[in-house]
Amino acid sequence: MQGTKADLMRGLWYVAAPGTALKPGKMLAKTLLNEPVLICRKSDGGVFALRDACPHRGIPLRYGSFDGTTVQCCYHGWRFGEGGGCTEIPSLAPGQRMDISKINTGDYPCVERQGVIWIFFGERGETPSGPPPAFPHFDKAPDAFVSMPFDCSADHAAFGLMDPTHAAFVHTSWWFKKDAATLKAKEKHFAPSELGWSMVRHQVPGRNIAYRPLGRKVETQISYMLPGLRIEEIAGETHQVVSVTAITPLTESTTEVIQLIWWSLPWMRPFKPLLRHLARVFIDQDRAVVQKQKEGLEHNPRLMLIPDADTQAKWWMRMKDEWVAHRRDDREFRNPIRETVLRWRS
């Protein structure tokens, strides 16, 4: 965890983009886990993902065109469809014998679920054992989203995401200002959950007016899940809100953070531009501080993690180590987290 680079985990689904970022008949090129990826939305609305490199001369396919079914390379017009197989080589003369079905640019398992495009990154042709995770309460596209590149590794982005004590010093907007001089003692109950851990579901104080539109008996739960998901659900008797922050590594040292928000409150729609702005400001504060942190990490300093405020960062590294070990040893994944109570001031 001390350096500027992170080990990239394989065998997992990663959030690639919100579905609304890709219209029918369009392509979206991204570098994900150090690999060139081209995501395509077909004319019928389906999505697929190819390796963004033509196997003929290596030119990225993103410079070509997409007709809603196949991608045509801009260099020699070779076409590739869903699955990566070559469907046409225009330069072949009549009678020339060549089995183009053996030509493949490579593809990735790609699924759209709840309005989120996921891509599975395996090893040596590995296929997913199941679908990407489902988020609670909603079967629709996010009501709002924000994405932002972070010039840091996925590990350091994750540490910031689960850090419970930095808000008083980093998130100091007028609408979300914390005063370090009046830090309050906190005590939270944690337990293991699927591929991670959760701050155990608990009822929020009734005096907090921010939760009143959700109805009575409002409960909240925050879960952290490999390969980099923070899932916060807030549910009352009347309405629900779910916020998901996805950490997707672009390379070993750069990351994209995508914030996805669902809500059941119909009157919130007019406020979507404002909420997106506030979310962008909030995330950008995290981006700016890890950018400053990178300056120090370039000198390879010795770092330290303290109890209990940094315990979740330690859990993150233990989870990663266990994921790598279970794949290496070809055994079941064993969650290393144990139920406990953590205390800090924030």
Image: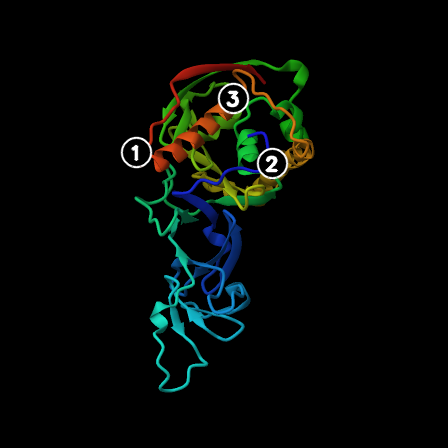
Residue 331 is tagged as 1
Q: Nearer the viewer, residue 5 or 29?
A: 5
Q: Secondary structure at mark 1?
A: loop
- The image quarter containing residue 102 is bottom left
Q: Identify the mark nearer the N-term, 3 or 2.
A: 2
- The image quarter containing residue 329 is top left
Residue indicated by mark 2 = 4
Q: Residues within 10 Å of mark 1 (few under 14, many from 20)?
A: few
Q: Residue at x 54, y 19 (%)?
A: 309
Residue 169 in the image: x percent, y percent?
Answer: 66, 24
Q: Identify the mark nearer the N-term, 3 or 1.
A: 3
Q: Nearer the viewer, residue 76 or 117?
A: 76
Residue indicated by mark 3 = 208
Residue 301 in the image: x percent, y percent?
Answer: 65, 27
Quadrant assignment for the C terminus: top right
Instruction: Report the mark closest to the observer, 3 or 2.
Output: 2
| Marks 3/1: CA–CA distance | 46 Å
Residue 230 visible in the current orientation:
yes
| Identity, as a three-letter code, of the amino acid under mark 2 | Thr
| Marks 2/1: CA–CA distance | 30 Å
Residue farthest along the bottom direction in this orientation: 94
| Identity, as a three-letter code, of the amino acid under mark 3 | Asn
